[in-house]
Image: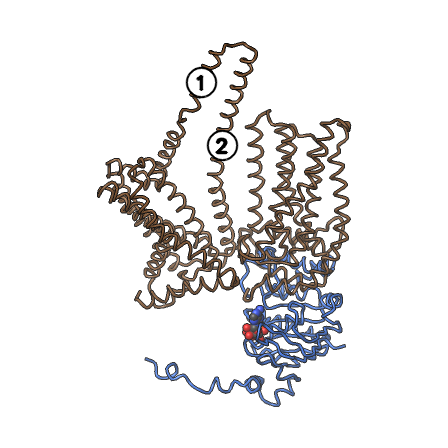
Amino acid sequence: MTAIVTAGLTRCFGEQRAVDRIDLRVERGMFFGFLGPNGAGKSTTIKMLTGLLAPTEGTIHVLGHDMSNSQEALAAKRKIGVVPEGLALFENLNAWEYLTFIGRMHGLDLPTIRTRSEDLLQRLQLNGDAEKLSLEYSHGMKKKLALAAALLPNPDLLFLDEPFEGVDAVTSRVIKDMLHRFVQRGSTVFLTSHVLDIVERLCTHVGIISKGRLVEQASLDDLRQGRTLEQRFLDVVGAGEAEAQPLAWLEGAAS
Amino acid sequence: MNWQQFAVLSWARWRVGYHQLRRQGVFSLIVTLVILGIMLAGGFIGFFVALTAGALGLSKASPNMVMAIVDGWLVVYLMFSMFSLLTEMQQENLLSVDKLLHLPTSLFEVFLFNFLATLLSFTNLTLGPPILGFFLALVLVHGPSLLVGPLLLAAWILLAAAIITLIRGWLATLMATPRGRRTTTVVISLIVMVVFMLPQSAIFYFSRNQQQQHNHRTTELQDLLKQHERQEITNEEFNARFEAIRARDAAPSNHWATVTAIVERVNLWFPPGWLALGTREAIEGNVWPALGASVLFGLVSIGCLRISHRRMHRLVTQGVSDRPRPNGRKTVRGETSPRRNALERQLPWGSPAVSAVFWASFQSMLRAPEVKMLMVIPIIMLLMFAGGISRGGDKIPPAAVSAMVVGVLAFSVLSIGQFAQNLFGIDRAGFRAYVLSGVPREQILIGRNLSLGPILAVVVVPVLVAIRLLAPLPWSHLAMGFVGIPLLLLVVSMIGNLLSVLVPFGFKPGTLQPASPFGLVFLVQMIFLWVVMLLVGLLIGGPLALDMIARETGWLPPAIPLGLILTSLELALVIVLYAVFIRRQGEMLQHRETKILATIAERGD
Ligand SMILES: Nc1ncnc2c1ncn2[C@@H]1O[C@H](COP(=O)(O)OP(=O)(O)OP(=O)(O)O)[C@@H](O)[C@H]1O
Ligand SMILES: [Mg+2]
């Protein structure tokens, strides 16, 4: 069964087509990197795939469930973990409470919730701050808590919107290893990131979106064709003009 | 600060305000601009009106009258200032130092700009011109010695601006952390609320006194009439005593004198009142108090400004961390044992998800300052009802005591209604967690609805118990009040769920003010308010009335608690209705959840 399939997926904000007729296909066991410049439509796509935003047009199937059908959407949501763009934390709960909440919403039993929360907080180096309200967390800490919550129910499919942004080097190493093993056991990851090094090291497949259009979708090796991912990415999104001209006043002699 | 910087700062300030307004919709923008325009024009016109009216009429006004007018203006001025401080707190402060300090401008210049902006505040622009006209009229009427008036006024405006600057700086330090920010906003709102209630309670007290006097007179006259009818007194005697009573009451009671004395006392002890007092003294020929007050105001202003500037300097040089300190609870790094927490508790029935939603909402609400604010409601109610009872003594009819049950319930349910009708607007990111979950939506609604129960109970129960202790409230009526808690909770929840799903709205952070105060949301809130009041009257007041009628007329033995039976039946019926409707409402929620999310969570949140 395919993990994610979309057909003609479109989202408009007023006149603007933020996501424009995208046909995605992500097989199970893929580590899928979704790349694109700022404002290309990555977050918008993830929101639609996870049911946070209604598509203007097009269909979505997640783990075989048609997301336009409310009962099937619920079934899909029980099997996925999400770190959305704005996160989904309760300001006034601390980390233990939040993880307990997520676990119980997924119907886990208490001993399982406790062991898993403990493991996750330990791994993500949040255990020293587990009793603070998430209101008081730093940006990176919030990201990590959201990631812990996404992993807690042991999902089949993970949607991560920029999971490494703001996260320190030690933890991001831990996360990379975790995700790597997660995919190795046959689960699927769909992530966006601007750090091409990470994508290159982790992902098996890559999609590139630019101005709302899906311009590439291939395995990493097919896409690279022997060059670096960065070179290919710059080619594909057409960054040529932006870098060509030096700014005379900025890059000339210092005053 | 050079001219260009000054201009660009003013421009930026205006643009920020404009965009904030525009985001709330065109309608809102137009209404606000029209109101602003009217008020500014009003201030301008007010100048001439005050000047001409004053020049024509003030020669006849007594010095005390002038004092009262100035005092009235002062009250309005203080309220305006408080309100604008409050609204300002809820807006992002463009000109906060940390946004400007990395630019080539000095701390002192930014400070000065902010102070000048305060002097040109909306309050001063609308309320300043009329009072200036008034003071100029005084000069025209009473001669050049009254020129101390405008001087005193200027000193006062300066002082007010300096104090506002001081408070603002103080708030900025308090609000450097998200938690502090919200707590401060709530505390300030509370203070404002209390301040606004003061005059009302004074009026209440005053009118009660008058009422008592009136009652007293009525009984006196009735006695006299009866005596006369029974021929116990002669006609002459009757006439004489009647005239005596009339003469006593007709004497322009010393009201005005008493009021003036009180106002004078207040003016003396509450320094802003020196503006009024100084003016009166000046009219009476003594300009020294006004001069003294002006000098004092000026000195205090300079002091305040120095303190504010120093504080700002300290804030910038030593810096406050944007990150809140760990809030007291010490946690040792490496410690991992999961604490048992409230979220692990299971309600006696319902799925784990219902319990999780219940406890998560309950816990969040307990920690949210908006809800802590609700806890003043029982205190206010206690003051109102208990105060009424203790003053009324034994003379309060039992029916009135029982009716208080309805009042208490109505009051409490209305305050809970704020949350019930917009279940998801308060914690935006939290709502995202619900949308992402695979839980049937009716369970989320049930958990959210029930979580308001304990809060309602905490508001209602103590007040009812207190009433029972203070007055002869029948036990069955007390019990009705208790049954009313789950009954009204479910009723309000059913309506509230519908509104939460159909017309959700976001709050301004840290307040209970809708992000866009005008328009549909406002209308819906008003209608909700009325419907809830109506339902409380119907569901609790109805059975109570029947109960009391049955007792009065005696067609039911007093042992049968008719009201209690009726409300219990209503409760059973409402539980059934709730169970039937909640599924449907859950489906509605799921159908509209992405729309709700888009409404309550603006981009960039
Ligand atoms: N709620 C919204 N209202 C209006 N426009 C929106 C909204 N959400 C997204 N957009 C627009 O849609 C486009 C895509 O936004 P999106 O957040 O998906 O970009 P992104 O690829 O995630 O960018 P980044 O890499 O910066 O996160 C942008 O042009 C953005 O302005
Ligand atoms: Mg994004």
Q: Residue at x 72, y 33 (%)?
A: B547
Residue B76 relative to residue B490: left or right: left
In the rendered image, residue A117, in percent from the top left (x then y), is placed at 66, 61
For label 1, the crowd category at 10 Å Cα-Cα, with few meaning under 14, some 14 to 19 and many 20 or more, is few
Residue nearest the observer in this picture, B419 or B321: B419
- Vertical position of residue B64 compared to residue A180: above or below: above
Identify the colour of chain B in the image: brown
Q: CA distance from mark 2 to mark 1?
A: 25 Å
Residue A129 visible? The answer is no
Question: What amino acid is at disc 2?
Answer: Ser
**Which residue is disc 2 drawn over?**
B207
Q: Amino acid at mark 1?
A: Glu
Number of the label disc, if any, that sits on residue A18: none
Mark count? 2
Q: Is B297 placed above or below B332 here?
A: above
Residue B249, percent from left and from top = 44, 23
User: Circle 1 sits on which residue?
Assistant: B243
Q: In the rendered image of this protein, does residue B123 appear above or below residue A88?
A: above
